[in-house]
Image: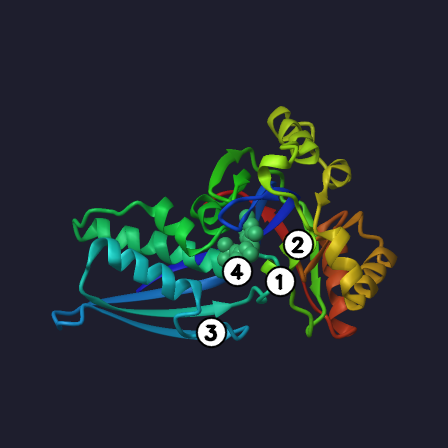
Amino acid sequence: MLKGTAPAKINLTLEVLGRREDGYHALASVFHTLSLADEVELAITPTDRSRSLEIVLEVEGFPAPANSRNCVWQAIERFWAATLFKAQVHVRLHKRIPLQAGLGGGSSDAATVLRLLTGWAQAQGMPVPDLQAIAESVGSDVPFFLQGGCAYVSGRGEHVEPLPALPPFWWVLAKPPSVGVPTGWAYQQLHRPPLADSALEAPCTKKLVDALRQGPISTPESLAPYLHNDFEAVVLPAFSELQALAEQMKRLEVLRVLLCGSGATLAGLCHSEAHASRVAHTLQQKGYWSEASCLVGAG
Ligand code: C5P
């Protein structure tokens, strides 16, 4: 049995620059992994049957699809297509990261499975396929999760440049249980011009990347002014439940409320672990999904 953890992510900045010809958008973002994580277990049983790949997927916790709509399934199929190994792959996913939440849970699960499959293939003496290409084909956030930690992410999500990780600053994550934001819809609401007509500037991301390289961010208070997400302008006005949640979080004295990816989770930057736990507890009592979670580095 192979085991791995699949961390959630937060976008400390997220700027959407323009529409590409392939229908995706060019973005500039600083991604950071969080301590909140799904657990992944993989059992690979070699088979000599004529149908060489068999996938069994079990899901516990948040109800992700246990079929080919799950990124994990797609990652296994694409790894198989590149290597043609003969095996039954039995995956058990324990989902602690909510779905359609902007926390990257499905992408992270897929990247973790790709890493576990790679370790297994190496141990079998099999050639290892081009993981970056497989990750890109499964989803825009999957390449980041192959490394995790802190990174400057650009292109459609495929260019990932590692940055020094921040200290384990604490956040409260919270989501109204009935709100999910489809990523494609959120991008459309931005009405970005074609890339050729766009200014390719991402001032908020550049400022944070420079600060991370120079190292002046040593407290959560000094991180707060750098946080930015372009989606806040279109997603928050569309969901009154998110506006109400943001107000509650501000009353609980978080330093900054930040939309996670394209939503629907809101992350509140906290002064300390005790502050984050206290706010999470209060929000849970009001019926929200909520967890305290801190920033974590790679691996
Ligand atoms: O790649 P992924 O499956 O995560 O993307 C979901 C949807 O989000 C895409 O179909 C696309 O509409 C939108 N998207 C985008 N630009 C990106 C990433 C995602 O327009 N860089």
Give the mark, 2 or 3, whose residue is nearer the N terminus: 3
Ligand 1 located in image quadrant: bottom right
> Does any portion of residue 162 appear in the rendered image?
yes
Give the mark, 3 or 1, whose residue is nearer the N terminus: 3
Residue designated by label 4: 105
Whole-angstrom CA distance, mark 4 to mark 1, is 8 Å
Residue designated by label 1: 101
Q: Are marks 4 and 1 in contact (CB under 8 Å)?
A: yes
Q: Residue at x 71, y 46 (%)?
A: 230
User: Where residue 66 is drawn, which disc sits there?
Assistant: none
Quadrant placement of the C terminus: top left
> Does any portion of residue 7 appear in the rendered image?
no
Q: Position of residue 44 (x, y in %)?
A: 25, 65
Taking the image as shown, residue 90 lies to the left or right of residue 49, namely: right
Secondary structure under tag 4 reads helix
Q: Position of residue 57 (x, y in %)?
A: 37, 73
Whole-angstrom CA distance, mark 1 to mark 2, is 7 Å
Q: Position of residue 260 (x, y in %)?
A: 66, 54
Q: Residue at x 28, y 51 (%)?
A: 119
Q: Residue at x 73, y 58 (%)?
A: 235
Q: Amino acid at mark 4?
A: Gly
Residue designated by label 3: 65
Q: Amino acid at mark 3?
A: Pro
Q: Is residue 102 above or below residue 220?
A: below
Determine crowd level at label 3: few under 14, some 14-19, many 20+ residues with C-alpha closer than 10 A: some
